[in-house]
Each structure stands twice: as structure tokens, then as C-alpha cells.
Image: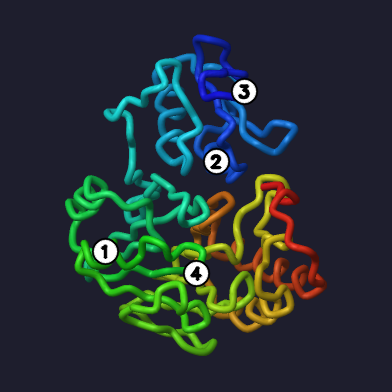
Amino acid sequence: MSDTARPDGGQNGWYVDDRCTNCDVARQLAPGLIGEAADGRSRVLRQPRDEAENRLLHTAAYACHVRSIRPPSRRLDPELDPFPMALDDSVYLCGHNSTQTAAANSYLLRRPSGNVMVDTPRWSEALAERYEALGPVTEVLLTHRDHAAHGRRWADRLGARLWIHEGDLAAAPDADRVLRGTEPVEVADGLVAHPLPGHTEGSVLYLADDRYCFSGDSLYWSRTTEDIEVVESVTWYSIEELAASLARSTPHLRFEWLLPGHGDRRRLPADEMTRRLAGLTDRVRALRPQPIDFSAVRW
């Protein structure tokens, strides 16, 4: 199907072309407007009814790593690019997801001691200028190897230190700081790296100010189950190691915001997050290895 074919909106509406990879990002950002088709890809459920909904579709389109969400004109309005987009008073969703980082979400955490980027959006000088305008970035934290592609370039441009775990060091061999072992490491005051091998050997979860949990691909909020989950079918390294990591780390994790690389975000009271993490730890302990199958993911 060519990109001029418009199965969702006919000849005059928004549509999703055949480059969609089922990353779920658009469905997170424009719920009710973009949904899942029978083949697992996204589709436009209905056309926008007002300017607010038009903006939601632009938000989804500017996050899409393959730019498969298209307006009637086939040209996005640059004035409606919302990224970086504030999620609360300290955290921004970066958008502009990259094909080279498996379409992962990335985040900017603003802190008085220096801003922190967790994983990265696609690289461009124009985007770098936006982040530079928000204040100095001192750290670029990589959660694991799948999200490392642009890390060095972003860190160099922003004058930041690049972090990765030794288990995934091959993906960023020139990192400035290398996390080792499984013990927590303080990156900065109130910012702690928790090595969490499982999804990959070098997966890391970053906890900030007992409020924000940047979980990479280790865990996420599922709209299907309305709970915290792991992506069992795409745990590359070891589901048993992930179970052990959760058992070791969960007692030390307290946060309100769950901010993953893939899957949805969620804010809940810290006590509720703690309760749900304990339940997740028990469930994952019972899991056994299975063949890798991205098509089995239902967000």
C-alpha cells in the first residue's frame, strides 16, 4: 500500500500508513482517536472534531518513530509540535522517537543541580537547541542497549556525562560512567541507578527524588490489565534474572510516576505503586522462559 492510500480517513482525513510497527506510542498520546487494528497496528478511529483533538493527533504524529501518522495534507504543522511536553512540573516527555532506539520514549528531568535526560529522542540539532534552552543537562542516562544509539551524540552536544551498565557496554563503549554489578549507585543527590538485569543483561532502572521511576523496558503500565507489567515475550536476557532483580530491588523503590521506554505511563500514590510492585514481583517469580515474540505484546 502506498503512503497515498488512506484506509482510515478516506481522501480527506488523518490516516496511518503501512509503516506502522505497533509500538503503541500514538495510542498512548491520542486515546480515542488512534486505536489498535486487528493486525496489531494502529489506525485512526475517527477524525478530530476540534482544534484540541487536532493537536492530539499532531502530538502522536511527532512522537511516531516512522512518521506513519499523516494529516490530510500529508504535512505536519511545525507550530503544533508540543515536544518536549511537560508531564508535570519537573518531567518532560521528549517525543520524536527514533527508529534506531526501537521507538522508545525518552524523558527530561529538570533539577536544580542540572537536568537529566533518560534515554534520548532522535538526534537533530534543532531538537538539541530546545533542550539547551531548558537549562544545562549534566547527565544522559541509558536504561539499556536497545536505547543507546544516539546517547553519545546527545551527551557531547549538551556537555553531559553518558551512563550505561557494564552488561550493555558494547552498545556505548565510550560511555563516561559505567555502572557495575547489581548494587544501587547514586548518580546525583536524590537520583539513584538500580541495575535490573532481565530485559537485557545491563538493564537499569533510575529512581529520582522518591517520585519518578524511569524503568526502561523492564516494566510498564498496561492499559489491558490496568496494572504494572513486564513484557514477558520480549525479555531478551532472562525472565528468571528479571524475577531476581525485582525481588532484590522492589523493597527499595518508592515513587509516584512510572515512566517506561515502552508501554504506558502512570501516576499513582506511592503506597499504591509499592503495593502493585509487590504483586508484580510475585507474578514474575512464577514466569518461565518463552520464545521471543513481539507480535504477542498487547499493551
How crowded pointer 2 is (Cα within 10 Å; few <14, some 14-19, many 20+) is rated as some
Residue at the image position 46 percent from the left and 44 percent from the top: 65
- Percent x, y for residue 134? 21, 53
Q: Which label belongs to residue 115? A: 1
- The residue that disc 3 covers is 45
- How far is the residue under mark 1 from the one under mark 3? 37 Å
Please give left or right for residue 31 compared with residue 175 in the image.
right
What SS does tag 1 mark?
strand
- The reply to whether discs 1 and 3 touch (Cβ–Cβ < 8 Å) is no
Q: Quick one: label 1 or label 2, which is nearer the N terminus?
A: 2
What SS does tag 2 mark?
helix
Task: Look at the picture and state if 40 lies above or below 282.
Answer: above
Type of amino acid at the residue the image marks with label 1: Asn
Q: Quick one: label 1 or label 4, which is nearer the N terminus?
A: 1
- How far is the residue under mark 1 from the one under mark 4? 22 Å
Type of amino acid at the residue the image marks with label 4: Arg
- How far is the residue under mark 4 from the one under mark 3? 34 Å
Residue furthest top as drawn:
11
